[in-house]
Amino acid sequence: MIENSVLEGSRPWACIILAAGKGTRMKSEIPKVMHHLLGKPLIGHVLDLLRNLDIASRVVVTGHGSDLVRDYLAEFNVNPVVQEQQLGTGHAVLCAKAALGELCGNVLIICGDTPLLKESTLASFMEDHVSSGRILSLLTAHLKDPAGYGRVLRSGSEGAQIQGIVEEKDASEAQRLLTEINTGIYAVDSDFLFDALDAIGCDNVQGEYYLTDIVGVAVSKGVSAGAVSAAAEDEAWGVNSRMDLARAETILLDRIRKNWMEFGVSFELYESVYIESDVMLSQDVTIGPHVVLKGRTTVGKGAKLGAFSYLEGAEVPPGSTIPPFSNCKRSQGTASALLPGT
């Protein structure tokens, strides 16, 4: 858990992960959150993001391809529920209510298709929600191209007060020029959340119950609400298409490689190296061009990986040399058998 955090001693947190969407633009029978990014489904990256946060319970709302999603979730400490009818994000959150039991605290709501969000951003957002005493907080971002995202409406001096969120399909031409977007991430008082969801309707282009409408309910009731523009542009991007998936892979790969360089790993032609998020490296490891590292591969201190080598679930001892074009998999026992200097 995050140490020295204002979250310690605060009201308990629960998390609702929205993972019911089909992902029409993916052109696939596979549920959107089950499309793989660097070796694991999109929702796996979101669950990793939450691992170290002080959250008492996690509920995942599934829908399209529910069985496949639930099978994957079996290895995680989460409570899956099914949204039988796709009636919108507001309805999806209502489907999670029973699974939260008698929770009296804060609810973090996050989408299962946001693998680029950073743990530090989410932790800061939760801390800000608690320290400000707000009932409702919304995480926003400013995008150069906000097409496809709901726009944040503000008023007052320098736009200090949030007025609501308008989905792009319902937005006017003037509203579509706004660049502050809704990331789909909320921190909400549990009592207010479900009272507000009971009050919203489905009078919109989609005929759905929008979770975003709870912002308007908060404003109309004079409840303390705020939008925190804290997420960097690339963190806010969701994955809605194959192109989005490819873009997310590029961004996440670059982060992983840079993090390992800061730790003490050297890359030759670093942009050519493919490395998944569960791979563990040690200091003074040298990785040659076009190396592929997958699964739970571990590489010991000072090891050298030759160009075009492929390692999947492998264990490379300290000081070892993997020759160029090697193919090492745990199932083959190859990498585990390598000795220093081989």
Image (cartoon, helix red, strand yellow):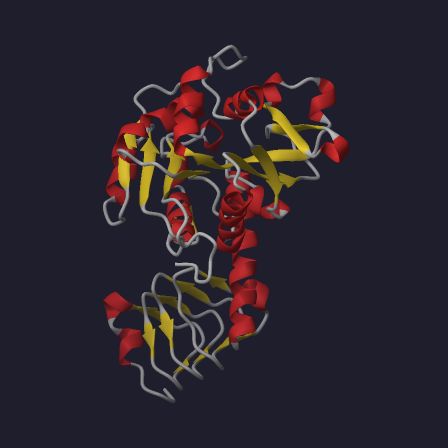
At horizontal 47% and vertical 68% (from top left) the residue drawn is 291
Using the image, determine if residue 284 lies above or below residue 249. below
At horizontal 69% and vertical 17% (from top left) the residue drawn is 172
Q: Where is residue 5 in the image (x, y as percent from the top left)?
A: 47, 57
Q: Is residue 88 visible?
A: no
Using the image, determine if residue 4 lies above or below residue 88. below
> Left of 64 or right of it: where is 145?
right
At horizontal 57% and vertical 66% (from top left) the residue drawn is 258
Q: Position of residue 142 (x, y in %)?
A: 67, 40
Name the quadrant of the C terminus: bottom left
At horizontal 27% and vertical 33% (from top left) the residue drawn is 102
> Left of 150 or right of it: where is 113?
left
Q: Position of residue 340 (x, y in %)?
A: 35, 88
Using the image, determine if residue 114 lies above or below residue 124. above
> Left of 106 or right of it: where is 255?
right
> Left of 162 or right of it: where is 313?
left
Determine which quarter of the picture holds residue 82. Answer: top left
